[in-house]
Amino acid sequence: MTVVAQRRLPRLGGFSAGLVALELRRLVRNRRTVVMTLVLPAVFYLAFGSSADYRAERAGDGNVAGFVLVSMAVYGAMLATTSGGAVVAVERAAGWSRQLRLTPLRPVAYIAVKLVLAMVLGAASVAIAFVVGAVTGAQLPAAAWVECGVLAWSCALVFAAFGLFMGYLLPTENVMQILSPVLAVLSFAGGLFVPVNQLGDTFATVARFTPVYGVGEIARYPLVHDGDLWPAAANVLVWTALFGWGAVWRFRRDTARV
Amino acid sequence: MTVTVEDEAVTRGAGRLAVELDGVVKRFGSVTAVDGVSLRIRPGEVVALLGPNGAGKTSTIDLLLGLSAPSAGAVRVYGRAPREAVALGLVSAVLQTGGLLKDYTVEETVRLTALVFGRPVAAVDEALRRAGIEDLRRRLVGRCSGGQQQRLRFAMALLPDPELLILDEPTTGMDVGGRHDFWSAIRRDARSGRTVIFATHYLEEADAYADRVVFVRRGRIVADGTAAQVKALASGRTVRATLPGADEGALRALPGVESVEVRGDAVLVAARDTDAVARHLLTATAARDLEITSRNLEQAFLALTGDDEGVGAGR
């Protein structure tokens, strides 16, 4: 061969904004994902939180509609980040992960792309729910709109880790059909749909140790200025660490050469 | 990941071997898929890995691509560890099935590949053109036929402009037309110098497209020779006759004779010109009960697993 070609490895292990953009385009092409993560939380808010009674009744510095809205934003962020992570199950089932091993893309860069996507989707979900809430009578103090939104979104990182863990654990293309009911149950258990103190002492105690509890408590704090912030923060950190560890464990096994 | 070369420029070298397998063994539990394979392939060779299903072709390819690690022995691709060669784009592959996402378009799939290889956008059009799927660029992968998907895999494999292209049973499941189109695309691409290794169990494919054919059976190389030798092997016929005290040397000296086997009173002569052998046997010897049969691929494989002296003995 007479041509002299220079061969180099790509920067950042193959991670690039262009790659994220392509993946994002594919993500929004999937109607089920869009409806489930971007539309459903806003619809739930309209169905369960925007009644005249809830708009009139006060909660913290806002109204009950606003309280329900923040909870639904947390739920949306959870769904979005979980499905963003769990998409690795689909890609493994399709043999795409194996195909990517024939490229310079490092597994760590691949995971980074998935995390960024999960968080972008989560941000979109929160934003849509908040816009719908703002125009239909949910009231929050100006600062709380931003604070609750950012907290709901950032704390949902725990579910990006959960999604990745499940994505590597479950060898199925229909992973979200399994995970959405799980998330719904966890949301009830964690006091996201119904406040834990309405469910009795025993249940309220158990609820504190479930993974949705911490995110909900923290996200609503700027509105209600009430609740156990430190146990909630500990809850988020412990669950993030657990799911993150699980994801790394399965991920190592997946990328090991046999 | 085991790639340790960062930002190192690699220059195409002529002297270096494209592939070097040295005593490679691959075991899965109690099953030995690759059983001591040593193979050297020079740059520019087009090599067919020919063998029945389960012969160890795919296991060998996985080792070459760094998708699995050998249980014993050494694998080098262009003088490097396979993972490194893959990451640098020295070697790429078209694997059997899967490996595509249905909700990407053809163009997006190739563009993504270009992004992770750090190749310019122009490389996308080039790869689509060379694979003959320019007109499919906006089609969703899930809507493409098997043959179209295979050409998409080919376009992805072309993107890094690899020195070595590996094709694992690339036409499995394609109809005759699809198979023809695929090989035409490969042929068009066969610019001087690209090394190609393809696994197949179609003798015709090995014959038509390979300079060198490596027969694999039960994880071992049983023969290694030119395509012409393989063709003779499979197109030849065998004369069987009853001839007590046959003179093996005399039979072997007949024109076109490839092998002579004596089993008790019976003699089996494999030859390209079996008419000449029959004429000799009937006129110059006491042979009787003549039978002339053509050998098919199965028998060729069987011949190779037994005593393969005289047939396609190789390098």
Image: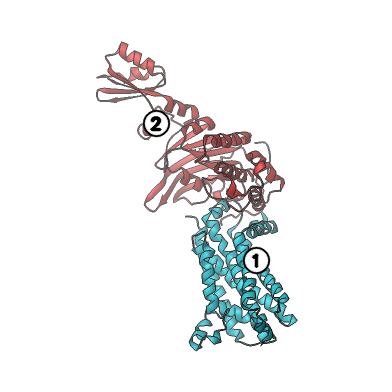
Chain colours: A cyan, B red
Q: Position of residue B244 (x, y in %)?
A: 24, 19
Name the residue nearer the viewer: B34 or B149.
Answer: B149
Relative horizontal placement of residue B183, taking residue B49 as reference (left or right): right
For the question of whether residue B315 can be seen, the reply is no
Name the residue nearer the viewer: B3 or A164.
Answer: A164
Name the secondary structure under disc 2: helix
Residue farthest along the right direction in this orientation: A142
Q: Residue at x 57, y 47 (%)?
A: B80
Which numbered dot is residue B243? none
Name the residue nearer the viewer: A159 or A245.
Answer: A159
Q: Position of residue A243 (x, y in %)?
A: 54, 71
For the question of whether residue B262 can be seen, the reply is yes
Q: Amino acid under label 1?
A: Leu
Q: Amino acid under label 2?
A: Ala
Write down the residue under mark 2.
B300
Binning the other alpha carbons within 10 Å of mark 1 as few (below 14), some (14 to 19) or many (20 upward) gives: many
Q: Position of residue B164 (x, y in %)?
A: 58, 41
Tell me: residue A49, above or below residue B44: below
Report the mark closest to the observer, 1 or 2.
1
Write down the residue under mark 1.
A121
| Whether labels 1 and 2 share one chain | no
Using the image, name the chain to which the residue with label 1 belongs. Answer: A
Name the residue nearer the viewer: A97 or A253.
Answer: A97
Name the secondary structure under disc 1: helix
Binning the other alpha carbons within 10 Å of mark 2 as few (below 14), some (14 to 19) or many (20 upward) gives: some
Using the image, name the chain to which the residue with label 2 belongs. Answer: B
Tell me: residue B221, above or below residue A167: above
Q: Position of residue B33 (x, y in %)?
A: 41, 46
